[in-house]
Image (cartoon, rainbow, N blue to C red):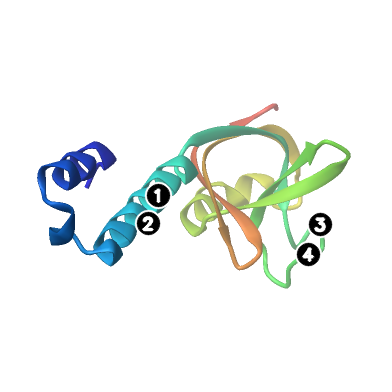
């Protein structure tokens, strides 16, 4: 329920009719919803697209990643399973620079990117 609708309902009803816990729950739900929308924003990462096993030696199985320099350190973003399947043959044992556009989420201590577009420099 949008915050403005909630506010107008609260103003239209006598205060005794709306339990405080209900107001708290609705407010928390709205905040979580707004945070979720923010997490789904589209980003473009530029870096080295490679294999987490063959190039970075971070996995026991092959997995497509993009390694991006952020400030003074490197951050590794793992492709989601569909994107991994679509692009892995192109980069396994042949890392290349490129750009990945998509949405990012954190899962199990790793950043996962759901790629909507991948561009290779060569």
* Whether residue 55 is visible: yes
Helix, strand or loop for disc 2: helix
Residue drawn at 80 percent across, 38 percent down:
69
Cβ atoms under marks 2 and 1 closer than 8 Å = yes
The residue under label 3 is: 56
Disc 4 on helix, strand or loop? loop
Between residue 61 and residue 4, name the one nearer to us: 4
Mark 1 nearby-residue class (10 Å; few <14, some 14–19, many ≥20): few
Q: Position of residue 120 (x, y in %)?
A: 64, 31
Q: Sequence order check: which comes first, mark 2 or mark 3?
A: 2
Question: What percent of the width, then of the height, locates residue 87?
Answer: 56, 46
4 or 1: tag closer to the N-terminus: 1
Kindly identify which numbered label has been placed on residue 58: 4
Q: Which residue is mark 1?
A: 31
Mark 2 → mark 1, Cα distance in angstroms = 5 Å
Residue 79: where, in percent of width, then height?
Answer: 58, 52
The label nearer to you, 2 versus 3, is 2
Dividing the picture into quadrants, the one containing residue 106 is bottom right
Q: Which residue is rendered at x = 75% and y = 63% of the image?
A: 53
Q: Could you tell me how far apart the alpha carbons at marks 3 and 4 are, in whole angstroms? A: 5 Å
């Amino acid at each position: 329920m949008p915050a403005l609708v909630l506010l107008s309902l609260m103003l239209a009803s006598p205060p005794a009719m709306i339990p405080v816990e209900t107001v708290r729950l609705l407010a928390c739900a709205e905040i979580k919803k707004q945070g979720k929308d923010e997490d789904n924003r589209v980003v473009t990462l530029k870096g080295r697209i490679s294999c987490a096993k063959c190039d970075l030696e971070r996995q026991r199985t092959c997995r497509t990643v993009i390694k991006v320099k952020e400030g003074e350190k490197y951050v590794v973003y793992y492709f989601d399973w569909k994107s991994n399947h679509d692009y892995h043959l192109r980069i396994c044992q042949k890392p290349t620079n490129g750009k990945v556009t998509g949405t990012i989420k954190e899962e199990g201590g790793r950043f996962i990117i759901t790629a909507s577009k991948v561009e290779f420099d060569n």
